[in-house]
Image (cartoon, rainbow, N blue to C red):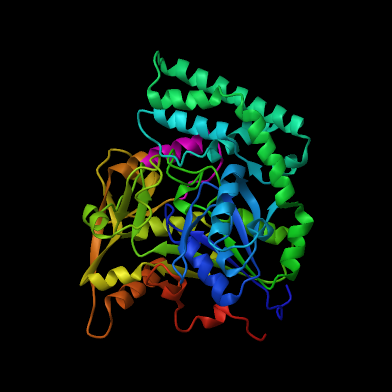
Amino acid sequence: MNETNKQKAFILAGLGIGEETKGAAVQWLCEILKANRVLRSGGSQAGHHIITEDGREQMFSHFGCGTFNGVPTHLKHMVINPADLFTEALELEEKGVANPFDMITISDDCLTVTPFHGAMSRLKEVLRENKKGTIGKGVGDAVTESKNHPELSIYARDFKFPISKIEEKVEAIRQQKIKEANALIQTLGIEELSDEAFAEMKILHNSSLVSTIAESFSILSELVRIVDQDYLADILENDQTIVGEPSHGALLHPWYGFIPHTTQIDPTAQDVLNTLQECTYPGRVIRLGVSRCYMTRHGAGPLVSFNRELTDQIEETHNNAGNDWLGEFRNGNYDVVAMKYALAVSGGINSFDGLVISYLDILEKFNEWQICVGYKCDSSENLEDFFEISDGVITGIKVHPNTQDEKHYSHQVRLTELLKQCVPVLTTIKATDEKTLEEVYLDFVEENLKVPVVALARGPKSTDREIRKGWEYLFYPTEA
């Protein structure tokens, strides 16, 4: 690599279970660095919420969170939803973004989700006795289908096919989903569907949607540039500053997460890092882990440090409503055990240049702050197969070798059940005569995670964020 090259790619990774404020961090980076491009990856079911200085609010699912700053977006390693992309573009236009489709390009190998994938995803959740949790868009179903029935998958490059050919593929997907739905209902022995299940089956049996879906795909190919790998290589060679914006958080990893409460896409941005390497990116790659100063979780799944009082005390402005499929939004104490595991499954602490921690203004309301430093688990299971244990306290979650087979899957399922039995071991930190509670907290995080905190946020807007003193060189170009 050319050491005098001032090009930089800032790749973010959420270290929680989503909602770590990655979107706001992207917006801030785009603003202070005058970024050339956002490289968006993951799944379009993710919603990155930002608030601009002039009061505009937007939940981004395809467009990067630098859009209001005039920063274009390239979608790569992304599962796209054309219907939602149209809606998002209209919303942006209403909020002052001129010609939003000119600000986005789509890699031709981006997988596409259809309304039939969404219906199947929601149907499965309706029929589950023990809820898994879903956003209900069908991204996971589309990814799974791309592996089990690759001939049915639709990619962005396919939007340029004649509409009749697109219709054939969409109809094949619909028929496959009907087949899967009927098999599921039969397996469960269900004789009469609930109203919710019937509504999803009605979508699957609506053949009139096929032509509408195919037409929307075709129209999208005329409105948005669909490009190949050479285009991305050109971006990486010429853009001085790129910001990588993935979806979800590391603890939702499809293989390392707490199965079945996981996503089907890679939330660690490892696929983006691989692409930079494959394209021999000439600049420096800076990797930042993003989290709040406490834990969050939507709906089902383990949250060992769950704290009802913290959930009730902290006002959540946009995560408690808007999608009934997500379930209750919960808060928990900052969890060192979970954070260490998130870093480990994301490549290890040495692969991160720093942490970005948000919602630190919350600490101003407290005289002391509790942090989860371990777990206790009352189980007859051999806990050492799953955890690092010291003096009877779980201090870490072991990373099981990812063989991507039934053995590994079963290990993660059992890990999930054990985590649901765990209770947190808390320690309390307090301000001192020399340091504020925030300063004590940041020192504690750095000491326990062995990764420096390089940027802070004390509110939802870009002006509420700042580079921590002494770390300016990491963000701004410097002479070799």
Depth check: give the residue in front, 72 or 408: 72
Residue at the image point whose x is 56% and y is 31% from the top = 116
Query: Is residue 359 shown left or right of residue 216?
Result: left
Query: Is residue 58 shown left or right of residue 447?
Result: right
- Magenta residues (range): 399-416
Q: Is residue 411 magenta?
A: yes
Q: Is residue 313 magenta?
A: no
Query: Is residue 172 shown left or right of residue 117?
Result: right
Quadrant (top left, top right, bottom left, bottom right) of the N terminus: bottom right
Query: In the displayed structure, would residue 244 be above or below residue 121?
Result: below
How far from the left and from the top, in percent, is residue 438? 31, 75
How far from the left and from the top, in percent, is residue 468? 44, 79
Quadrant (top left, top right, bottom left, bottom right) of the C terminus: bottom right
How far from the left and from the top, in percent, is residue 180? 54, 23
Residue at the image point whose x is 35% and y is 61% from the top = 336
How far from the left and from the top, in percent, is residue 170? 66, 30
Residue at the image point whose x is 51% and y is 18% from the top = 182
Q: Using the rendered view, name the quadrant where residue 464 is placed.
A: bottom left
Query: In the displayed structure, would residue 244 be above or below residue 345?
Result: below
For the question of whether residue 28 can be seen, the reply is yes
